Image (cartoon, rainbow, N blue to C red):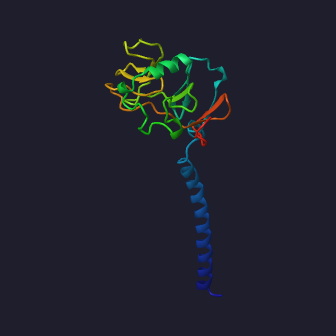
Amino acid sequence: MNADEMDVGRRRFLTAATSVIGGVGAAFVAYPFLASWSPSEKTRALGAPVEVDLSKLEPGQKITIAWRGKPVFIVNRTKNYLDHLAAVNNDVLRDPLSEEPQQPPYATNAYRSIKEDILVVIGICTHLGCVPLFKPEVGVIDSSWEGGFFCPCHGSKYDLAGRVYKGVPAPLNLVVPPYKYKSDTIIVVGEDNQQGVA
């Protein structure tokens, strides 16, 4: 075997070894870089469904939970609240029949909810993203006020079903997130109600 043949064999071996080591090194360098593109556990948890126990939610009470970084209002509407909701004149509402797609199909009704007494809405004003105040008392905002949500930043008003009044800056009803009943007292915000009923 002459020197030229030995050099060619050695060159092939060194080229192959260098390629393999370089490929393994590139994989070790690329993995953390590519892994940094996937969302963190905290970010994944923010988008995860949230279970809420309604057994401690008193009639007339509102609680706020966080889902996907947004406040979600859950209101246990009393019979009195429902009576005042029914008293709202549809002529004063911008979208009284919930024709805009601000809610899932199973919440496209007069109550904008699966069960008439439990309201679930994202608590963000549809004008500029402020958080409205819960003002269920009749006449607190003005003489025609039947109770609902009021955004003090620019004066947008919503009834106790989250439907927006005419003549205010907010263009749409409050958003109803996807949700379902896991049991009579547990709801899951972030998962659709497949049956459309409780």
Residue lying farthest left?
167
Horizontal relation, residue 54 to residue 167: left or right: right
Horizontal relation, residue 159 to residue 78: left or right: left
Name the foreground residue: 10 vs 60.
60
Q: In which quarter of the image is the C terminus?
A: top right
Q: In which quarter of the image is residue 116?
A: top right
Expressed as whole percent of the image width and height from the top left, the position of residue 73 reads: 52, 26
Expressed as whole percent of the image width and height from the top left, the position of residue 143 reads: 37, 12
Q: Considering only vertical position in the picture, is 112 above or below 139? A: below
Name the foreground residue: 140 vs 131.
140
**Could you tell me how many numbered marks the image carries?**
0
**Residue beneath the point at 60% across and 77% down:** 12
Q: Is residue 71 visible?
A: no
Q: Is residue 193 visible?
A: yes
Expressed as whole percent of the image width and height from the top left, the position of residue 140 reads: 42, 11
**Residue beneath the point at 52% across and 21% down:** 82
Q: Considering only vertical position in the picture, is 48 above or below 32? A: above
Expressed as whole percent of the image width and height from the top left, the position of residue 48 reads: 59, 38
Q: In which quarter of the image is the N terminus?
A: bottom right
Q: Quadrant of residue 157?
A: top left
Q: Considering only vertical position in the picture, is 178 above or below 38? A: above
